[in-house]
Image: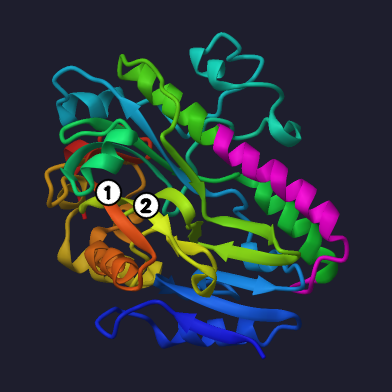
Amino acid sequence: MSTVTVFASPASWIESDAVAQCHQVAALDGMLHVAGMPDLHPGKGAPIGAAMLSSVLYPFLVGSDIGCGIAVFPITLKRPVAEKLAARFPDLDRALDPVADADDPAWDVLDGDIPAGHTESLGTVGRGNHFVELARVDAVLEPGHASRLGLDRGDLVLIVHSGSRGLGERILRAHTEVHGAGPAPDPAAYLAAHAAAVRWGSLNRRLMAARVAHALGAAPAEPIVDECHNLVEVRDGLYLHRKGAARGDGRDVLVAGTRGTASYLVAAHAGADAGHSVAHGAGRKMSRADALRRGRVKHTVEELRRTPVGSLVVCGDRQLLFEEAPTAYKRIEQVVGDLVEHGLATPVVTTVPLVTYKTADRAGDRRRGRR
C-alpha cells in the first residue's frame, strides 16, 4: 500500500489541496511512496514540492519543465553598486542564436553539441518563478563546508533558476497527446528524451551566468551548485519522480527564498522516507491571481522594484512583479527550519539579493512607477 509523508511542522503553511494531491498521486497504479517537502503547494494535476516513488513511470508527475533547477556561480566584482549593476544586466529574454551570435563569448561554456539539437530560447530565463540573481553571502553557518565550496561572508554569487524552456514542454506534449496522464509506454524512450532536457537546462543556466558575468565585467566561473528539481531518477529499479523537489542524497542545494528575502545553501542528507529529496524553495502560499489582486491594493510598482532588503528587481512585466511578490511565498526560514528539524539538510550559508532579474525592463516603466 502506498504511503504519504509530509515533512513539515504544525507551524508550516501547507494547503489541504496540496496534501489531497499527494494522496491522489499515492493512489496511482504502482505508486509506493509520496514525500511532501515543507514548500509543498498545489500544482496542475500533481503537487509541487514532492518526491514520488513508483514502479511505473508517469511523465506528468515531472511536468513540462523537465530539467528545471538552480545553479550557483561565484563571481568577482569591484565595488558592487546595485543600481549600476542592474542597468548592465543583459537582455535575457533575447535568445542566443548559434549562427548570428556565434562570436558571443558566452558560447565558451558549451562543451560538445547542444542537447537534442534544441537551439530555440538558448540563454533565456523564461517567466514564472524563474530568475537570475546577483547575491551576496550574508552569513556563514557551517564554516568548514562553506570553505570547501570556496565561500566566505561578503562573497558574491550568481543564482540562476531556469529549466529546459520549450524542450521539456515538447517532450511532455508528445506523451500527453496520446496517453494523457497515463504511464510512459516506453520508459527507455522517455528517459532518453528526458536526459537531453536535463542536460539542456544545465547548459542554459551556464549560458545565462556567462552572459551576465561578461555584461558585468567579470570572468565566468563554473557552478559550485547545479541541482535539478524537475526530473525522474531510476533508483533500485524504481522511478523516483521529483516535481519541485531537489536531489537530497549528499548534495549541496540552493533553497531559494524570494527576491526580498534570504536564500539558503544547504548540505542535503535526506533518506528514503523523504524520497532522497529536499525543498527547492520557499513555495507559494498564494495563487498568482490572489497575489496580483492583493498586491495591487497594497503595493505600487516602484515599491516592488526595491525590496525590503534593499535589492533591486529588473522586471518590465508589471503583472509578473505582483505575481512574484515576496508576500506570495512562504517564509524561507520556516521551510529550511523544517528541513533541519526532520534531519534532511544542514544550512551552510545564507545569501541576500542585490539584483534580481525577472524579465527585461520596458523603457519608462521605472520612471513612472504606476500601480
Circle 1 sits on which residue? 348
Q: What is the magenta range? A: 180-203
- Secondary element at image label 2: strand
Residue occupying image coordinates x 64% and y 39%: 199
- Residue 215 falls in image quadrant: top left
Give percent across and percent down for residue 121. Answer: 59, 35
Question: Residue 353 occupies which quadrant of the picture?
Answer: top left
Question: What crowding class fits label 2: few (fewer than 14 Cα within 10 Å), some (14-19), or many (20 or more)?
Answer: many
Which kind of residue does numbered mark 1 sit on? Val
Q: Nearer the viewer, residue 356 or 68?
A: 68
Q: Residue furthest top?
A: 103
Can residue 362 be seen in this snapshot?
A: no
Whether residue 6 sits left or right of residue 368 in the image: it is: right
Give the Cα distance between marks 1 and 2: 7 Å
Q: Label 2, on which residue? A: 267
Q: Quadrant of the N terminus?
A: bottom right
Snapshot quadrant of residue 108:
top right
Q: In the rendered structure, does residue 193 fall within the stretch colored magenta?
A: yes
Q: Nearer the viewer, residue 315 or 269?
A: 269
Which residue corresponds to the image point at 50% horizontal and 18% vertical from the top-left? Answer: 106
Q: Quadrant of the C terminus?
A: bottom left
Q: Main secondary structure of the magenta part?
A: helix
Which residue is at a point 84% across and 52% down the rendered structure image?
189
